[in-house]
């Protein structure tokens, strides 16, 4: 039988071990949540532009692009005045009817009588690339232009910062657009969405450095210079087992 002192010691060690494990798990969970929130912080700094065609017929798809071009062309000067996402929201709110009229005029010019609904709202998007930039899938604030039944293939870009003026077909992003993205996003946020060759080259260099770091770490371990945290946990568990075996 285990004496009272042994029981007390064993219980105390087990309790401390459980508390330490619980605290470690909670800390890791907090880190994961914070990292996720931080990694997606760029989404709150963007407003996307989303145009949905009436249907997938060639005529409706062509009309969708004409409506897109007409709105961008007519509203470009207004959005160029904006220096913040708040100003862009205000411009959008003040010009909903104006954009609707622009869209309707283009629709009527092409011999259609579709209605148009324009909203500023949260919407889910798939992953999409624009030139050098790739925006991961997720929920974004967006200006949505719904043409007719809005059941056709859609087109989207970014209204703020003004990524709508990217040559999507040829994958060209002008210097001004890149500067605007850097202006409104942090360096980490910008790196999150950049997909150009420079980033790939940078990642390759970092991978090489990581391999070197791993090799150096392995060398240090062989030299006894690195103390692995897991060893402490193993030692603690072994000690608990020894005490339990000793006093039982």
Image (cartoon, grey):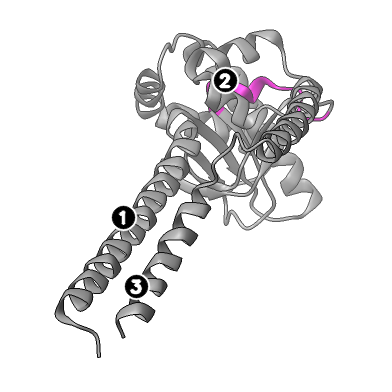
Quarter of the image that includes the N terminus: bottom left
Q: Which sits in the foreground, 229 or 176?
A: 229
Disc assigned to residue 162: 2
Q: Which structural element holds mark 2?
A: loop
Residue 170: image location, x then y, percent: 84, 26
Q: 10 Å neighbourhood of mark 3: few (<14), some, or many (≥20)? A: some
- Relative to residue 221, is residue 28 drawn left or right? left
Q: Is residue 235 above or below residue 121?
A: below
Residue 100: image location, x then y, percent: 48, 34
Q: CA distance from mark 3 to mark 2?
A: 67 Å
166 drawn magenta: yes
Q: Nearer the viewer, mark 1 or mark 3?
A: 3
Q: Which structural element holds mark 3?
A: helix
Q: CA distance from mark 1 to mark 2?
A: 45 Å
Q: Is residue 102 above or below residue 14?
A: above
Q: Nearer the viewer, mark 1 or mark 2?
A: 1
Q: Which residues are magenta?
A: 159-169
Q: Which residue is mark 1?
A: 23
Question: Quick one: label 1 or label 2, which is nearer the N terminus?
Answer: 1
Question: Quick one: label 3 or label 2, which is nearer the N terminus?
Answer: 2
Residue 19: image location, x then y, percent: 27, 61
- Relative to residue 84, is residue 104 drawn left or right? right
- Please report contact status of discs 3 and 2: CB closer than 8 Å, yes or no: no
Q: Which residue is mark 3?
A: 243
- Relative to residue 192, is residue 57 drawn left or right? right
In the rendered image, the residue lying farthest to the bottom is 1
Q: 10 Å neighbourhood of mark 1: few (<14), some, or many (≥20)? A: few
């Amino acid at each position: 039988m285990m004496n009272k002192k042994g029981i007390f010691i064993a219980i105390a060690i087990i309790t401390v071990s459980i508390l330490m494990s619980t605290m470690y798990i909670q800390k890791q969970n907090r880190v994961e949540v914070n990292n996720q929130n931080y990694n997606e912080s760029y989404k709150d700094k963007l407003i996307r532009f989303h145009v949905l065609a009436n249907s997938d017929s060639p005529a409706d798809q062509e009309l969708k692009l004409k409506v897109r071009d007409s709105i961008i062309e007519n509203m470009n000067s207004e959005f160029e005045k904006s220096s913040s996402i708040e100003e862009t929201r205000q411009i959008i709110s003040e010009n909903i009817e104006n954009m609707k009229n622009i869209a309707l005029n283009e629709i009527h010019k092409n011999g259609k009588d579709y209605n148009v609904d324009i909203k500023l709202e949260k919407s889910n998007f798939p992953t999409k690339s624009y030139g050098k930039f790739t925006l991961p899938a997720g929920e974004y604030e967006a200006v949505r232009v719904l043409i007719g039944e809005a059941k056709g293939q859609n087109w989207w870009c970014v209204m703020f910062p003004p990524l709508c003026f990217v040559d999507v077909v040829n994958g060209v992003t002008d210097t001004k657009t890149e500067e605007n993205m850097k202006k409104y996003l942090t360096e980490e946020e910008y790196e999150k969405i950049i997909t150009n060759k420079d980033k790939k080259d940078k990642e390759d260099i970092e991978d090489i450095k990581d391999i070197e770091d791993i090799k150096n770490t392995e060398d240090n371990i062989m030299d006894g210079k690195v103390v692995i945290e897991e060893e402490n946990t193993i030692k603690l568990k072994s000690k608990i087992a020894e005490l339990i075996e000793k006093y039982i």
